């Protein structure tokens, strides 16, 4: 297996989420997909964009009213801005849905595999040997993210992985298993797989934390 993150394009899958059959001795431990609502809220910032256009509509209506316009005219102008804003919001929601539908994350005994991409599906392979640490973050909606930090100087393409990438980490992108219903399960599986791959013991489990590549610190709970 390559010692570098691999990006592969493919049209068909012998095994769902994988670009080809697993090598001998490698097994799938966990598979999961993101929830579209999590992509829409935390990757595409749909809620903030919608609020922005609503505020514009309110301000526009108030401005017209202060200038002596009638209530109907002010409401019409405000509604026009809402309709204009609804177009990009709808497109972003569509993209979030398609992204969730076409994405599949896989943890094997040797690597993380991320099948992502809407128009052009790609597979990103991240061998455990490249992982410096992994963190899990939980959200109020019950979903969670598992974020992976690669050991320097290894890195992946931010554009190739977006929106399955930690926001605002451009210089050292962090791949992310985003908006998972079972984030704790995925985190536990990854923690144990990293520990098993390096033959180090796994400590007691906690609600959240971080998994580090053996030789750096404790495994994630």
Image (cartoon, rainbow, N blue to C red):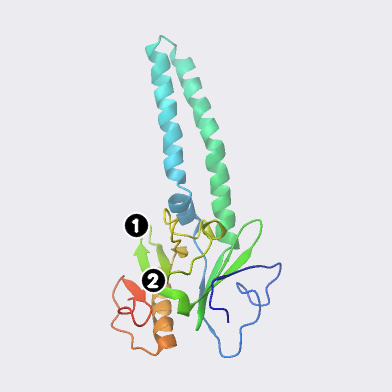
Is the residue 138 above or below the residue 64 in the image?
A: below
Residue placed under numbered mark 1 in the picture:
140
Residue that appears at 45% across and 40% down: 49
- Outermost residue toward the top? 68
Coordinates of residue 67 in the picture (x, y in percent): 40, 10
Q: Are marks 2 and 1 in contact (CB under 8 Å)?
A: no
Q: Position of residue 37 (x, y in %)?
A: 47, 54
Q: Which mark is residue 76?
A: none
Question: Which residue occupies 43% across, 52% down?
Answer: 42
From what the image shows, is residue 211 above or below residue 54? below
Q: Nearer the viewer, mark 2 or mark 1?
A: 2
Residue drawn 36% across and 82% down? Answer: 214
- Nearer-N-terminus badge (2/1): 2
Residue ID for mark 2: 134
**Residue 203 in sight here:** yes
Judged from the image, the secondary structure of the residue bearing numbered disc 1 is loop
Task: Choose between 181 and 60: the one closer to the eye.
Answer: 60
Residue 40 % position (x, y): 48, 51
Q: Nearer the viewer, residue 41 or 76?
A: 41
Q: Which quadrant would residue 17 be assigned to in this image?
A: bottom right
Q: Total marks drawn?
A: 2
Q: Please indicate, yes or no, whether residue 107 appears anywhere in the rendered image.
A: no
The answer to whether residue 96 is above or below residue 179 is above
């Amino acid at each position: 297996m390559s010692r570098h993150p691999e990006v592969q394009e493919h049209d068909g899958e012998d095994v769902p989420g994988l670009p080809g059959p697993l090598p001998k001795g490698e097994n799938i431990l966990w598979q999961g997909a993101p929830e579209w609502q999590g992509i829409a809220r935390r990757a595409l910032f749909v809620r903030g964009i919608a609020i922005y256009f609503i505020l514009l509509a309110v301000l526009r209506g108030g401005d017209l009213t202060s200038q002596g316009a009638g209530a109907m005219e002010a409401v019409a102008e405000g509604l026009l801005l809402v309709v204009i804003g609804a177009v990009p919001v709808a497109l972003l929601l569509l993209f979030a849905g398609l992204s969730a539908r076409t994405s599949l994350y896989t943890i094997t005994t040797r690597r993380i595999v991320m099948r992502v991409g809407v128009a052009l599906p790609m597979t990103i392979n991240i061998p455990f040997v490249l992982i410096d640490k992994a963190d899990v973050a939980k959200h109020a909606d019950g979903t969670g993210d598992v974020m992976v930090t690669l050991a320097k100087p290894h890195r992946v393409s931010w554009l190739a992985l977006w929106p399955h990438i930690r926001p605002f980490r451009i210089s050292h992108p962090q791949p992310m298993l985003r908006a998972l219903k079972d984030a704790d399960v995925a985190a536990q599986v990854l923690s144990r797989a990293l520990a098993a791959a390096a033959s180090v013991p796994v400590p007691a489990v906690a609600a959240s934390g971080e998994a580090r590549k053996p030789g750096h610190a404790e495994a994630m709970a």
